[in-house]
Image (spheres, rainbow, N blue to C red):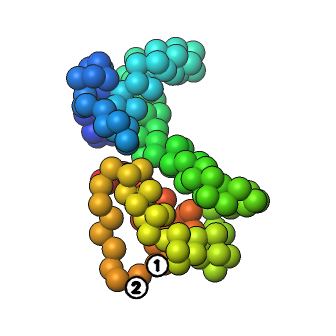
Amino acid sequence: MGRQYLPIIPLLRRSPEAVTEKSPSSPDPRQQLAQLYAEYAQLVAWFASRLLSRSEEVEDVVQEVFLIAASSLRNLTEPPKIRGWLKRKKPDLPEIDLDLDLIDNRIVDSLMFVDFLLFLEELIGRELDIETGLVDPFRTLRSIRDNFLRPAV
């Protein structure tokens, strides 16, 4: 018995415009994925067909590739945007590692924290639901990515 997959291929075969409307401040990950699919699906299928003989296996590989891309699409784009924003605010910053504590290292201080939250809300396209006094989800780029940038499943 074969694997069960989400019906992602039919969704992605539609034009990117048909999938969803793009918000000017925060591109929709489904639209980005649809654009990636339109550009690269044939190439992925061609490579897979060189290694596999059955068309069903080729389709499985193409679907796996784009499921993996879907699960990590935001992670490929948002942390560099956050780094860029932080660098604009503090140009003398060295490279910011995913696990560097932004608060303890005073990269994001108390005066800048509200601006940082507003920037994150604009980036993800929704209001952040935060508890008063809870800063741990904002301490590192990794925790921001894991708490706010991962697609909902």
Residue located at (37% from left, 41% from top): 25
Q: Amino acid at mark 2?
A: Gly
Instruction: Residue at 40%, 32% (x, y): give it.
Output: 32
Tell which of 12 and 92 is nearer to you: 92
The quarter of the displayed image where residue 11 is located:
top left
Question: Label 2 belongs to which residue?
Answer: 133
Seen in the picture, residue 6 relative to 53 is either above or below; the reply is below
Residues marked 2 and 1 touching at CB (< 8 Å) = yes
Relative to residue 117, is residue 14 depicted above or below? above
Q: CA distance from mark 2 to mark 1?
A: 6 Å
Describe residue 87's horizontal placement relative to residue 94 as left or right.
left
Identify which residue, 18 or 42, lies in the foreground.
18
Residue positioned 53% across, 78% down in the render: 110
Q: Residues within 10 Å of mark 1 (few under 14, many from 20)?
A: few
Q: Position of residue 23 (x, y in %)?
A: 31, 37
| Residue 40 horizontal/vertical position (percent) | 49, 20
Question: Callout 1, which amino acid?
Answer: Val
Q: Nearer the viewer, residue 145 or 123?
A: 123
Q: Quadrant of the N terminus?
A: top left
Point out the residue furthest to the bottom here: 133
Q: Which residue is mark 1?
A: 135
The label number, if any, that marks residue 152 in the structure image: none
**Residue at the front extreme, as displayed:** 111
Say what secondary structure mark 1 lies in. Answer: loop
Work out whether 150 lies above or below 69: below
Left/right placement of residue 110 relative to residue 37 reads right
